[in-house]
Amino acid sequence: MKYAVIKKEDLNKWVEHLKKTARLYAPKKKENQFIFRPIKDVNEITLKYIPTILPPKKYYYPQKEKLFRFKIKPFKTAKAIKAFEEYILFAVHTCDIAGIQCMDVIFREGPEDPNYLNRKDKMTIIGIECLEYCDKYANCTSMGNHVPRGGYDLMMVDLGEKFILHINSEKGERLVHGLAYIKEADEKDMLNLERVREAKKKVFKEEFNASLIKVYETFDKHFASKVWQDVGRRCVACGNCTNVCPTCYCFDVMDEMELSLNQGMRYRIWNSCQMDDFAKVAGGEDFRKGRDGRQRHRYYRKFKYPVDKFNRYFCTGCGRCTRTCMAQISLVETVNSLLAEEGELR
């Protein structure tokens, strides 16, 4: 069956079933924010939430990841992790699923990244479609990520008394197969889904003042824009924007030696293009000395460079960078400022 339905009263029963099949990660409240965490009690799960502090990226691309153990004399290396466990990401927003799709593009490009791919192969994604804005910071509509665009195994949509489930893979099929409380969707359910989607169109509006194609063209022309100087003056180089982004993938590699200095562990850790020393090379040369140049680079890595290389925008519209910025730099405001400058030049 392509679509199925589950009554809300049976949802906790289903989640308990999911916990038995694999390790379950889901959103839960933490003070006035939300985080993805392993779930022990199904009552911890919250389905209505603003994007979590960190995206679920931390589970398929960890902040600090063991690569391999090594020994110098005699020289020897060994994998740090021999096997990855099966796990489920539950109630993932469509913007974060878009982030996973972006990461797939990066880590599947040759040479492929085995750690990422092995983790991804063990992952099952159950999404939930937003029917209203998370908050004022999101720009998911302009990015086209306010609606499901693939990349998931199951997608949940709230129909009131029920959730309708779009089954999008064999993994998703296995998670609902044989459960008496999950039924195949009938014609009435499909009409309700259509009704919900039509109502949603009145809620979500374009956040950018022009189409994405126009945004791309504007980035193509405004590398030397005064907008970057303004953003650079305000930026405090904290790196929050890149740390919370679901599509930032820069990393550094470091060796941690034991006291014997004969053996140790090699790690990779998240890195940020917003750090002062990120673009420094041998001899002390720095290709992006100023914060204006570093901020501009971040924006171009979302709206220009990946479009040229992969035909895909790497901003998902989640709003995390704006939400977490200590200098209150708004992504939507910056893009619209560039668009306004383009209009003034015409």
Image: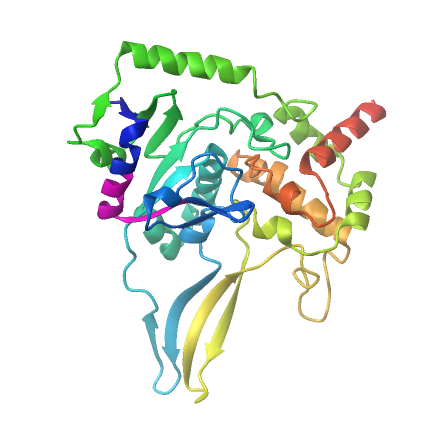
15 and 324: which one is in front? Answer: 15
Q: Residue furthest bottom?
A: 260
- What residue is at 64 percent from the left and 22 percent from the top? 211
Q: Image point 40% across, 37% down: which residue? A: 91
Q: Is residue 322 visible?
A: yes
Q: Position of residue 196 (x, y in %)?
A: 44, 16
**Left or right of 342 on screen, residue 214:** left
- At a point 44% along the width and 45% down the height, the residue shown is 28
- Please report the bounds of the magenta region as a residue range: 15-26
Spot occupied by residue 68 in the image (x, y as percentages of width and height): 38, 70
Please state, as top left, top right, bottom left or bottom right, where the C terminus lies in the image. top right
Q: Where in the figure is residue 227, as x and y percent of width and height? A: 80, 39
Was residue 19 drawn as part of the magenta stretch in this picture? yes
Q: Is residue 277 left or right of residue 224?
A: left
**Would you say 228 lies left or right of 244 here?**
right
Question: Residue 232 versus residue 204: which sits nearer the camera?
Answer: 204
**277 left or right of 141?**
right
Where does the image place residue 86, in percent across and percent down from the top left? 28, 50
Viewer-closest of 211 and 317? 317
Residue 330: image quadrant is top right
Identify whether 196 is placed above or below 261. Answer: above
Q: In terms of depth relative to the viewer, which is nearer, 163 or 244? A: 163
- Quadrant including the N terminus: top left
